[in-house]
Image (cartoon, rainbow, N blue to C red):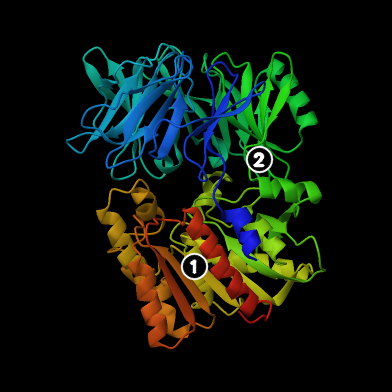
Amino acid sequence: MNGAARRWFGAEPAVNLALSPDGRAVSWQSEQKPGVFVWRPEHGVRTLRPGRARIVDHAWLPGSGALVAVVAGRTERVIVHDEATGRTADVTPEDLAGIHIVDRDQPRRGSLLLRGTGADGRAAWHVLSSPGGPARHVPAPGAAGRLFSDADDRPCAATARAEDGSLIVYAAEADGWHEVWRSRPPGSLVTHPVDVTADGLGLYLSGPCRNGFLGVRLLDLRTGKAKTVLEDGEHDLDVVPHPATRVPQLALVSGARQGLRALDPELAADLSVLTSRHPGELEIVGLTRDNTVWLVQVDDGESVPRHLLWDRGDGTTHRLTPGRPRLMRRANRRALAPTATVAVPARDGLTLDGYLVTPTGGAPPYPCVLLVHGGPWSRDVWGISPQAQWLAELGYASLRVNFRGSEGYGTRFLDLGRADWGGGMHDDLEDTLRWAVSEGHVDPDRVAIMGQSYGGYAALMAATARPKAFALAVAICAPTDLVAFLRYVKRSSHHERAHFLHRVGDPDDDAHRLRAQSPLTHAAGCHTPVLLVHGRDDPLVPYTQATTMADALAEHRRPHHCLVLSGEGHGITSPANRVRLARVVGRQLAYHLAGRPT
């Protein structure tokens, strides 16, 4: 059990992968070792360690071979390392804190955009143009969350979120920034900027189109008028633009399986060759500005995802393997547990997409864990899930389902979850379990439910307010008192504030309903052992939501355990705590599902 926890949740050897501007190198950071690692097909891996401080982010400076790194400390520093000369320069903008690189996925001509917090507490933007030169301040609207530049790196559009969740678009004009367009909830909550056109006169937006499915609209920054440029009325679509022309070249098609649809006939032929050689779901990690070299992640659902450097010009691919060596050695010995796509019938006639992973040994029906995603306006996807693979190694099946209220299936499906926490969304979870039992996959007497954020809330509702269906409930960073939680959110400036107030409820106007939907209200009726886990520094759901629930369970003498982890936020992210949590959960599963003493 301990070995599986380390393999799947230990320190990541590669995070923040980035493609060099010339397409000849890939860089990444590691949770295991300090520095930035640079790989070239002809030379292998080289390690750059600019000082002893921890690097929190990095990117390549367009137009040069230099690497830009954000270095941790009392305040972040920005350093530039020029590989050609071996020189390192500190280019940290004065009086700027919380610095991060904001356009690593938007190839620019010759500069890099940085965002941080100025001395006045407001967002401040700087542009870095040369390896040794200072970063220049860039004027932007005070509330801007995104800043977009034309093909010559000139800022031309900005977007911001208002307190009520409205999306505001600003255009740069000779006399400053002016608001040109505004979208209000609920449409604005699922509308996101993609990129500007190369001439800087238009902004592509992903948002609701025909039949409520997401498509792409083009907003004219001069007139404020928008027109639909891509939709199909049956799937949510997003796009990958050409890095130089900014014209959409690939459509990302949502569904039970995610797909790439080429919008250019020439690219369709190239993509067909790539997918025939490397079957699976493709994710574009990086592209060169001329679009000739791509960094691609391939997930075939049966082995460790791999990265490829693909030269579209000559069709060659180079395999990059910065992943977990222990997992790769295991995968070489035998395939990982495969992920099956399943269609689950809900009690009201809806069909839900789900994913079933079963152990490679043993025979059904299996002990099982129902894994519930967060949000709830998130979703599960096909492919390798570390949690599911870890459970399979321990001998458990796992089920994931995109219940109503999940994203990826249009706004109508998403809106079915509005004000419905603990209701129809939870019916879908129970229907998924019922389906798995009826199909012979799962032993109904040996099932646990586990999730983070909304998923943790669902686990607690299953343990308290709903009929007993599970032998164990694991709730990570879960809201337990919806009235207190939403009052906290309402006072905050969290980026999802409007989502919660619109989709869950107002803590004052809807207090009666929200109390009825709160696990804390039903603590006395808890019929299932509960494991509560929370980060002490959670900025969205205060850790007191877990401790208050633990106190209520203790008062009513209900079996529970509460684990509050220092240094963690909304999610358990440090490798040591990830492994610790997996071990704790593993022991609980062994006791409650397998009948093994711990």
Residue 61, percent across and down?
44, 20
Residue 190, percent across and down?
46, 41
**Amino acid identity at mark 2:** Gln
With respect to residue 322, does 491 lie above or below? below
In the figure, residue 595 lies in which quadrant?
bottom right
For disc 2, the neighbor class at 10 Å (few under 14, some 14 to 19, many from 20) is some
Residue at left offset 58%, top offset 80%? 468
**Amino acid identity at mark 1:** Ala
Distance between the Cα atoms at labels 2 and 1? 28 Å
Left or right, 342 with reference to 532: right
Q: Which mark is residue 258?
A: 2
- Return the residue nearer the eye: 138 or 65: 65
Mark 1 secondary-structure assignment: strand
Left or right, 518 with reference to 236: left
Residue at left offset 34%, top offset 55%? 539
Residue at left offset 33%, top offset 34%? 145
Residue 461, percent across and down?
49, 72
**Residue, far left:** 120
Residue at image mark 1: 475
Q: Is residue 147 in view from this perspective?
A: no
Residue 438, percent across and down?
76, 70
- Return the residue nearer the eye: 507 or 449: 449
Residue at left offset 37%, top offset 19%? 221
